[in-house]
Amino acid sequence: MVYKRKVCIFSIYLLFIIPFHTLTAGPRQDRSGPYYTNLQQFPVYIREGFDREFTTKVPAGDLGPWICYRNDPENPGPLQIKNLDFPDIRNPHFLSPKRLPEREFTLLIPFSLNARQAIPGDTPPVLGVFLASLGDNWEIYLNGSLVLSEIHLDDAGRIKSHRAQRKVSFPLDSSIFTQGTNILAFRIVGDPNYKNVGFYYTSPYYIDEYTTIEKNHDELMTATLCGIYVFVGIYHFFVFLNRRRDLHNLYYSLFSVTLGTYLFARTRAAYGIIADTLILSHIELASLFMVVPFIGAFIESLCIQRVRKFTMGYAAFFGLLAVLQMLGPPSFADDVLRIWQILALAVVIVYIFCYDIGYTFFSAGYRLWKQSGTGERFAHLLRIYRDLLINHPVGNLIIGTIILLATAVFDILDSMFFHYGIVLTQFGFFVFTIGTTLILARRYGFVYGQLNLANSNLEERVRDLTEANDRIRNNEHKYRSLFEGTSDPMLLLDETMHIKDWNTAAAGFYGLSDFDFDGSPDKSPTLPDRLYKDSRERDSTAERFRQYIRELKTSGDPVEVPASVKNPIGEFKNCILRMEYIPSLGGNEILVRARVSHKETMTEAYVEGNACFKIENTLGAADEVSRHARSRLSRYLPAEEADFAAICLREMVLNAIEHGNLEVSYDEKSEHQKNGTYFDFLEERMEDPRFRDRRVLVEYSINSRRAVFSVTDEGKGFDYTRYTSGRESAPDLLEHGRGILITLSAFDRVTYSGRGNQVTLEKQFTPEH
């Protein structure tokens, strides 16, 4: 809170104290000095033509060719040749590109020094003259003596370098002064229709101590402002280069640099760099014309993240004006400036302030007010606008924009009518620039805070990943040690079931000894390629194992799968494959350990028994029931018959899962199998709330005379008579009832009951078994 208060106080100082100080230290004249003489209180005599003799005599009596111009000292105005009643001086047509020939004029200002202002004989102070403006080419004489010359004409008498300057000041030689009336004379050369020919600013024009003049018109603060604007603009341009999607930084950079260029072109320091004031005028007007579009584009890109087409349109038109004012004579540039002044007033007041800022601000507050639905409607609306003023970029811009708007309007009107030449806009822009900089600084502060938070989260994430990688390396080392050190056949698979590696025991067990493995996954064999498939099974080995891998990925728990492995001469041996995921730096791998199925002790001693299983709707559960039944049937049946009976039992369990509990129709199954999406379709059904809690009940009773199996599902049943009565044609059975067909051939009796959701299988053992 203390920090925010300090920032607020500092901001107020920047926004108000510095401009106030600058105004009070700017162009003012200290009228209390003993040598101060206001030249505007004296008459001015003007005539066309120039002769050195004109500079030493004050016209008297019949003025003849002279015109006497008297100004109001309390409410002075500019003295422009174009506004005087000289014959043959006609204002050209508006936007006329015609350049008129230059003409010469003489201006005389007779003035007197009072007794108290009389210069002491011994140590006279150095007096000087300050002129708010003077143009176009000129010479200055005091009592007939040339004081300063800025005449630059070619051999034809045309101006080759313009010198329409602001804030002209120079010291005077005290020896030239006389007691009583002195004459300050001016030789002026220029196009009489050009507004800058003469004294084109209203005030001040005076004589005082030269040190006082220099102190009163010090441009240090203006130069500082120009430096601030250019520096801030360059800074935001580099910010834009680092983050190019934030276009408001680019527009703010262009605005700030253009503003600094405009203000610098109006300073006396600019004359030391570019002496020709017509060139400086073109630079000044071009930069002035583009300030408004740049500030409009900045406000829109900051508030709505885009620049509207209207802004792009008037920016293009103002850019055209900036080029046009360079193509004609100075009077043509004045007419182009007048067009810009009128349009700029409309754009700044109506569009930028009322629409871009005002409408955006008030519409945002109104939307929040309507969404709140609070009972304290008007009071709440005021609170919303207060919060927007503090926290929203548009609200932050309003105060600075109001000050900027007021100063811009004054300066445009001053340029059109008053001619004071104060340029309040430089201070309005200072308030706006500092306020905007604080807005962007706060935004960058927010982004910096978010970045720090993101960095903190990233560092934490990196630590977690480093720890996870360490655990993966340790686990990988552990599994690799187990992989190489065990006598069990072990494989490493990727998720597409391609074999990535194997140990010595697996080379002989799976027939991989002669396989030339180059490390390319797409050229390595797959696990289903090394397994034996009974032709009587309805689904392929690859499909079965893809389902096992899905279950492994879903649960994360190891899966044991009964399988038969082919040997090189085509025989097979039964085994149990244990599959489990192991994390690896190269991606998840599947470790497969094979355990050869030997007859269990229980199988050797088994005589008779009963069992009951309630299983979920998974392929693994069907395989486990089948394997368990086979181990019991092998006590009374040869291995091949026991395998066949177990396969048929598995078919009935799968039918109960798919067509019973999951209610998969034969057409749906055929369609998804054709598209290769059947197992994905089954997983969706398993997660369906209608089916996911259903179970399959498997019961059996085995003794020395027979085996009886009962499979019951919780589905709707089906018309089993189509498959058990012999009415179904052979092609239909091959397509949809193959499991039932082979089961009828494997068991002595297959009986459906109820609505078809229970089937009983009975197998009689012959005495020799």
Image (cartoon, grey):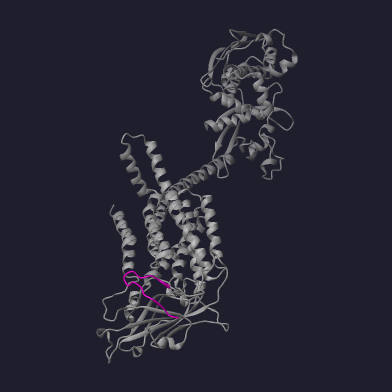
Residues 176 and 611: in front is 176
Q: Magenta region's main secondary structure?
A: loop
- Rendering coords of residue 447 (x, y %): 43, 51
Which quadrant of the figure contains the C terminus?
top right
Q: Quadrant of residue 646?
A: top right
Position of residue 449 measured from the top left corner of the image (x, y, whole percent): 40, 51
Quarter of the image where one finds residue 214: bottom left
Instruction: Note whether 622 is above or below 79 in the view shown.
Output: above
Q: Residue furthest left?
A: 116
Q: Pinpoint residue 682: horizontal percent, then vertical percent.
A: 59, 25
Compared with 338, 647 (above or below) is: above
Read off the magenta span. Answer: 65-79
Nearest the camera: 700 or 61?
61
Residue 252 seen in the current view: no
Q: How many marks?
A: 0
Residue 351 is left or right of residue 118, and the answer is: right
Q: Would you say 246 lies left or right of 173 here?
A: right
Name the residue furthest front: 62
Residue visible at 55% across and 79% down in the picture = 158
Nearest the eye: 280 or 333: 333
Q: Position of residue 443 (x, y in %)?
A: 41, 52
Q: Is residue 5 magenta?
A: no
Extreme residue toward the bottom, this view: 122
- Please identify the quarter of the rendering in which residue 731 is found: top right
Judge whether 95 appears above or below 402 on screen.
Answer: below
Q: Is residue 65 visible?
A: yes
Q: Is residue 528 above or below residue 235?
A: above
